Image (cartoon, coloured by chain):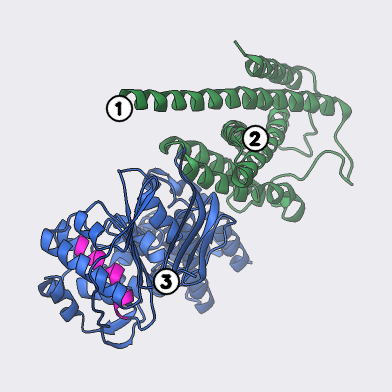
């Protein structure tokens, strides 16, 4: 059984059937390169293998684990991935991103040195040049294999685009070294050096050629400890995105209501509505990390790592509780239950917004969809909570 | 030229106009004891039939979405397109007529704590989201799958809306036809049925012509794609 197994794959993209009954197996210690003209389906194979696109027919398996099939079943296993988009968020630090991809803490500067990026270890990815950012994306793709004792699958989609010739040379050597360590690599590329480093080349549509590339030498990167990413919370602290988006919306709502109403003299339902409104308004802005994840299609890369996208849910809970506490103070009515309910209501609103946003991510223009149109769906639960608390 | 759909819509519109005439000129007024604004109650003969029509359009949207999602039939996508537009049109009809009636009867056009009002508004917003959202995307399997998912899940709101006045009657009145508490007067019922048939004709005609239009759009897109190949 191969490490990467794609069988009988049929995929529709737009109105076109890009793949029809395509099968491919990549074995341990093998580098398979997909080559062919633009639009022939190379990226579709990589994304289908990674489980990122829905399949009309067929299955994708990695390390024996089902990743996705046409019935909609999905699974997850550890593998390396570099897509055509860089899939990096501008506010991630270079070293941090590589360790998050590896899921281990290790001496990242030595690894970055190999790619001439040691001096950028603590820099935000946003300040890198396009080529440097591509290197980070490529390193994120290969690092899960480099730190693993067991063979790992690596999927790379045109990793060489935007890289200088030295880096391409280094990448092709890396591929041979990974193969020597028993890892299975599926790579899409037009670059002759990369094609030459593959054991097999699949030319679309469809011809196969075998190569005899030089053998590499695998050296496992020594790890220090398992890494719990907590990416969302880390990014939220760094960017204060939660405060800037949700917090300001909540505070503005509170300010507007203070201007309109005589806050200390409200009673019953109106008073509770007043107290709960800032948390609702803040929650309607959605999870702040979701916005960051839209950058360079980062969400697609993260979804292969974990079923739940990075988020800052605990920070949000604290924010909503604080907003409810603040509005409670302005009405001279502080009740712990009400404050806690305000926090939970804000979180519920935020999660619902996140689910609605994620439901549109498969679209070719997800940002063009006005998801906010569906937000009134959250006013009813808010009104019911307020009504129940008042009675 | 195939104009069956348009003819059915015109018949429906004529019927809706006739219903309005009957509502204002023929049907007896309701009791001043039960209603604080009896004259505004006449909007009921458009409000309720358009709500039934909206429910049917949403049911069609569900059928179209589900069949496309699981069977990938082109007719199902066309049904999804046409019925979402019909659901939006009838939904907006229900909401504005309800707001007018509510203003006169309750003194407020809207109540955010009334479950029926809100669930119905959600249904209409969902159709608005589907109609507007679809226009922002190129046609393709990703677009179709995504909006059909919303069409399928959104249908949960239909039974929820239906039972809402039975379980949580807040402001919106409960059912008036064939309930354990009795039914409305026959004169009123005739006008209501007339309205129901008219609105049914409107959405049926709209869905027929909408599906044809969607088919023409799809044909045009295929022809353009072929033309692109020739040009390239």
Report the residue marked by disc 3.
A313
A6 sits to left or right of A222: right
Element at label 1: loop
**Coordinates of residue B32 in the picture (x, y in percent):** 77, 34
- Which chain is the one coloured blue? A
Quarter location, residue B209? top right
The answer to whether residue A274 is visible is no
Q: Between residues A128 and B166, which one lies in front from this camera angle?
A: A128
Element at label 3: helix
State how far apart marks 3 and 1 are (Cα): 50 Å
State how far apart marks 3 and 2 are (Cα): 43 Å
Q: Between residues B23 and A346, which one lies in front from this camera angle?
A: A346
Task: Write down the chain letter for disc 1.
Answer: B
Quarter location, residue A149? bottom left
- A53 over A137 or under it: above or below: above
First-in-chain label (2 vs 1): 2
Which numbered marker is on residue B101? 2
State how far apart marks 2 and 1 are (Cα): 59 Å
**Coordinates of residue A336 in the picture (x, y in percent):** 50, 78
Element at label 2: helix
How many numbered marks appear? 3
The residue sitting at 21% across, 84% down in the picture is A107
* Co-location on one chain, circles 3 and 2: no
Report the residue marked by disc 1.
B232
Q: Which residues are magenta?
A: A134-147
The residue sitting at 65% across, 49% down in the picture is B157
Q: Give the dominant element type of the magenta stretch: helix, strand or loop.
A: helix
- Disc number lying in front (2 or 1): 1
- B183 over A98 or under it: above or below: above
- A374 over A385 or under it: above or below: above
Q: Between residues A362 and A108, which one lies in front from this camera angle?
A: A108
């Amino acid at each position: 059984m191969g490490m990467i197994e794609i069988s009988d794959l049929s995929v529709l993209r737009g109105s076109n059937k890009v793949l029809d009954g395509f099968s491919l197996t990549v074995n341990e210690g093998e580098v398979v390169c997909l080559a062919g003209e633009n639009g022939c389906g190379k990226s579709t194979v990589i994304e289908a293998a990674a489980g990122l696109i829905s399949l009309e027919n067929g299955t994708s398996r990695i390390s024996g684990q089902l990743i996705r099939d046409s019935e909609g079943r999905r699974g997850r296993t550890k593998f390396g991935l570099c897509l055509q988009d860089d899939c990096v968020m501008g506010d991630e630090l270079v070293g941090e991103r590589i360790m998050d991809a590896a899921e281990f803490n290790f001496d990242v500067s030595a690894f970055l040195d190999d790619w001439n990026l040691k001096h950028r270890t603590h820099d935000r990815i946003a300040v890198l040049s396009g080529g440097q950012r591509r290197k980070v994306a490529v390193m994120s793709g290969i690092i899960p294999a480099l730190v693993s004792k067991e063979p790992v699958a690596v999927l790379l989609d045109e990793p060489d685009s935007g890289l200088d010739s030295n880096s391409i040379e280094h990448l092709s050597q890396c591929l041979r070294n990974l193969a020597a360590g028993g890892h299975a690599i599926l790579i899409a590329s037009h670059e002759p050096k990369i094609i030459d480093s593959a054991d097999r080349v699949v030319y679309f549509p469809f011809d196969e050629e075998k190569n005899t590339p030089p053998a590499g030498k695998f050296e496992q990167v020594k790890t220090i400890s398992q890494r719990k990413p907590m990416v969302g919370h880390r990014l939220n602290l760094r960017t204060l995105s939660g405060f800037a988006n949700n917090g300001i919306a909540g505070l503005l709502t509170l300010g507007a209501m203070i201007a309109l109403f005589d806050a200390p003299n409200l009673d019953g339902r109106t008073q509770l509505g007043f107290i709960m409104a800032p948390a609702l308004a803040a929650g309607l802005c959605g999870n702040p990390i979701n916005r960051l994840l839209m950058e360079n299609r980062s969400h697609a890369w993260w979804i292969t790592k974990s079923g739940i996208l990075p988020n800052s849910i605990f920070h949000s809970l604290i924010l909503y509780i604080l907003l409810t506490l603040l509005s409670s103070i302005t009405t001279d009515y502080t009740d712990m239950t009400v404050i806690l309910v305000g926090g939970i209501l804000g979180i519920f609103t935020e999660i619902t917004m996140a689910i609605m946003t994620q439901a549109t991510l498969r679209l070719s223009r997800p940002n063009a969809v006005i998801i906010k149109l569906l937000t009134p769906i959250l006013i009813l639960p808010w009104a019911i909570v307020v009504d129940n608390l008042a009675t | 030229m195939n104009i069956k759909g348009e003819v059915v819509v015109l018949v429906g519109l004529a019927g809706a106009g006739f219903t309005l005439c009957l509502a204002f000129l023929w049907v007896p007024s309701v009791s001043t004891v039960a209603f604080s604004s009896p004259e505004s109650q006449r909007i009921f003969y458009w409000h309720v039939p358009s709500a039934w029509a909206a429910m049917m359009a949403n049911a069609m949207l569900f059928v179209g979405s589900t069949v496309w999602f699981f069977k990938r039939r082109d007719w199902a996508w066309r049904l999804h397109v046409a019925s979402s537009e019909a659901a939006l049109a009838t939904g907006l009809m229900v909401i504005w007529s309800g707001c007018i009636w509510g203003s006169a009867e309750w003194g407020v056009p809207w109540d955010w704590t009334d479950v029926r009002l809100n669930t119905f508004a959600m249904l209409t917003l969902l159709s608005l989201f589907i109609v507007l959202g679809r226009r922002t995307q190129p046609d393709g399997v990703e677009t179709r799958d995504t909006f059909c998912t919303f069409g399928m899940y959104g249908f949960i709101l239909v039974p929820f809306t239906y039972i809402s006045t039975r379980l949580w009657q807040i402001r919106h009145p409960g059912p008036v036809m064939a309930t354990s508490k009795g039914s409305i007067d026959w004169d009123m019922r005739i006008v209501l049925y007339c309205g129901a048939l008219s609105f049914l004709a409107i959405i049926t005609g709209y869905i027929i012509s909408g599906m044809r239009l969607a088919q023409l759009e799809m044909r045009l897109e295929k022809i353009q794609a072929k033309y692109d190949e020739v040009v390239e």
